[in-house]
Image: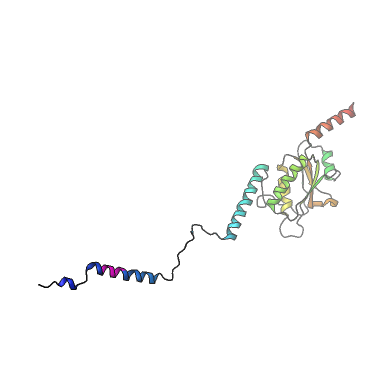
Amino acid sequence: MSNNRSNQPSSNNRESSDSGTDFEAFQEAMSGVKRNTKPNNKVQLNKSLNTTNVEARRKAAVAEEIQERSGLTGGEEHIELVGPMDILDFKRPGIQNGVYRNLRLGKYNIEARLDLHRYQVESARRAVYQFIQDCIQHEVRCALITHGKGEGRAQPPILKSCVAHWLPQLPEVQAFHSAQKHHGGTGATYVMLKKSERKRQEDLERHQKRRG
């Protein structure tokens, strides 16, 4: 009785042959593929867009901080606009008319100056606030802010309008008035500041000596 099974390939040999063929085919298919050894777990942002967003957020945060710290409100879209030749004038109750007249006529010594030319609205807001604080710290009584008058432009003078809107919001400012021609005319403003406690005491003592 013959054994026909000895002439037929075993199932194990056939599976081994098939596996070898499949592996060779896989190797051939993957021959041009290189393995990526660097992890790619970061999202690349457009640099210019990212920088722009960060800068915009930074400016917004600074503007908000200045507004909260100083109380200065109002930008070019939220203020009453003035004309190039309009006179800016303001005084708080209790300021003597003679004192205000001397300010208006430019008779006080200008102890500090701020020039806002080429400033943007937000940077001007910060500059005005810090300037007034510095004046108070150094006991400045009369200062000059040059803002320009925007003459010859299609739009009203934005910085001049902003200064007129901001200064009354600062309690340290007692009065202000557009300057005399030799100090810039309607393109600049005299600012009278609150006396320090030391100067107030000195004036009181001086007045008492005169009386007595």
In the rendered image, residue 73, in percent from the top left (x then y), is placed at 66, 46
Residue 139 position by quadrant? top right
Q: Residue at x 74, y 51 (%)?
A: 160
Tell me where residue 157 appears, x and y as whole percent.
73, 54
Seen at 89% across and 28% down, the residue is 209
Which quadrant is the N terminus positioned in?
bottom left
Q: Is residue 75 left or right of residue 148?
A: left
In terms of depth relative to the viewer, which is nearer, 137 or 41? 41
Magenta stretch bounds? 14-19
- Work out whether residue 134 or residue 165 is closer to the camera in this orientation and state it: 134
Residue depicted at x 15% and y 72%: 4
x%, y% of residue 6?
A: 17, 71
Residue 51 part of the magenta-drawn span: no
Residue 90: x and y in percent read 76, 43
Magenta stretch: residue 17 in it? yes
Between 138 and 14, the one lying in front of the other is 14
Where on the picture, by quarter, is residue 195?
Answer: top right
In the image, 57 versus 185, the foreground residue is 57
**Number of numbered callouts drawn:** 0
